[in-house]
Amino acid sequence: MKQAWVRLEKWSDELAVAAIESGADALVLPEGFADRAKALGRIAVVSLDGDLKPDSDIYFEPLVCAADEARIRERLAAGKTIVITSAGESLQSSSKPHVHPAPWEVIPLENLLAVGSGSIFVPAASAGEIELALGVLEKGVTGVVISSEDVMEIKNLVSVVKKMPGHESFRLARIESISRAGIGDRVCVDTCTFMNRGQGMLVGNSSGFLFLVQAETEKSPYVAPRPFRVNAGPVHSYIRIPEGRTCYLSELRAGRRILVYGPDGTATEATVGRVKIERRPLLLIEAISEGERGSILLQNAETIRLTGPGGDPVSVSQLEPGDSILVAVEASGRHFGMKVDETIRED
């Protein structure tokens, strides 16, 4: 999950509260204000008297020349956390941070991200800068540091970070077969978020072939819509979660972060509010996309829906061989939810 830090050059209760309420991950503060921040809410503090201390836990570094890049590269290789700053700027600087233009460029960031260790934070003053920073090398920096004296700007920019866990390029898959699969323990994932028509979660029997299972947003003669819920499948199924990982449905708990996808591939994070597991009749659905095969088990009920090419919901009770649905396919296998480059087959 990408992080949003908010930097306050001068202490302000109003700005600190705005950062905490908007979901910021840390406050970057001058020395002497850590306790005041903690009194307002649970949040990490980057400060000489905070949770994360400069020059020990975190290094504030300029990135304006090759020597800077080499120094930062060494620290990243050692697993350190780096915050890119303007030349001459420090944590205790009383001058306003240099944010126009941002004190970083894409190519040096690409070089540093290629190191593959440590964490990088960069300042960002607009939604465009945030999108650029979080998308460099398709990996992005660990997070951004937002500096503003405007409450609404802080809230808006933090929300941009929190709504950008990534984007999925969906493929069309053709249904090959649907068959009864006995009884199993299936999982309903209830989130703290209302989902819209077309939105759902990526679930499947293989981490490399996931189906877009829609939320229960549709009206039914038998059950009221539950747009916060995805009837996701049995306990063994994989589900896509932040940071490019997967986990089993059986591992989800209240408070866990998962990913919700729209039919255009846009992903947003949601918090699990409850996981409900019940024994229900199951269907095995098998599909093929560009020569790759995958499958999913879902409850045999008309309210469970996959996603058609235009984002339209398709009930599993009406699904037929030859129908097209949206899937996410990747080549890599996974080990403990993380992508690995090795031969793994899941049938």
Image (cartoon, grey):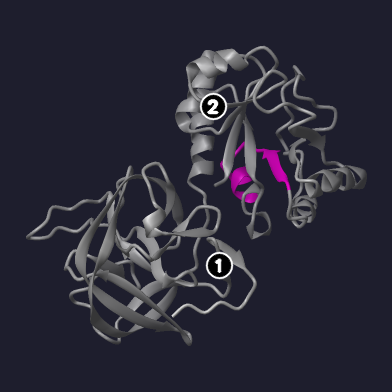
Q: CA distance from mark 2 to mark 1?
A: 32 Å
Image-quadrant location for residue 8? top right
Indicate the amino acid at tag 1.
Arg
Q: Is residue 274 above or below residue 205?
A: above
Q: Which mark is residue 32?
A: none
Q: Residue furthest right?
A: 67
Residue drawn at 78 percent across, 32 percent down: 60
Q: Is residue 197 visible?
A: no
Q: Nearer the viewer, residue 186 or 314?
A: 186
Residue 299 vertical position relative to residue 113 in the rendered view, above or below: below
Question: Which mark is on residue 334?
Answer: 1
Question: Which of the pair 230/146 is nearer the observer?
Answer: 230
Is the C terminus in the top left, top right, bottom left or bottom right quadrant? Answer: bottom left
Q: Residue at x 75, y 45 (%)?
A: 79
State the residue at coordinates (53%, 32%). 24
- Under tag 1, what secondary structure? strand
Looking at this view, is 334 or 113 the one in front? Answer: 334
Is 212 in the magenta? no
Q: Amino acid at mark 2?
A: Ile
- Determine whether 161 is above or below 315 in the image: above
What's the magenta region?
118-132
**Does any portion of residue 79 appear in the rendered image?**
yes
The crowd level at tag 2 (other Cα within 10 Å; few <14, some 14-19, many 20+) is some
> Which residue is under mark 2?
43
Counting from the top left corner in percent of width and height, residue 6 is at 60, 29
With 295 as the anchor, is 1 left or right in this view? Answer: right
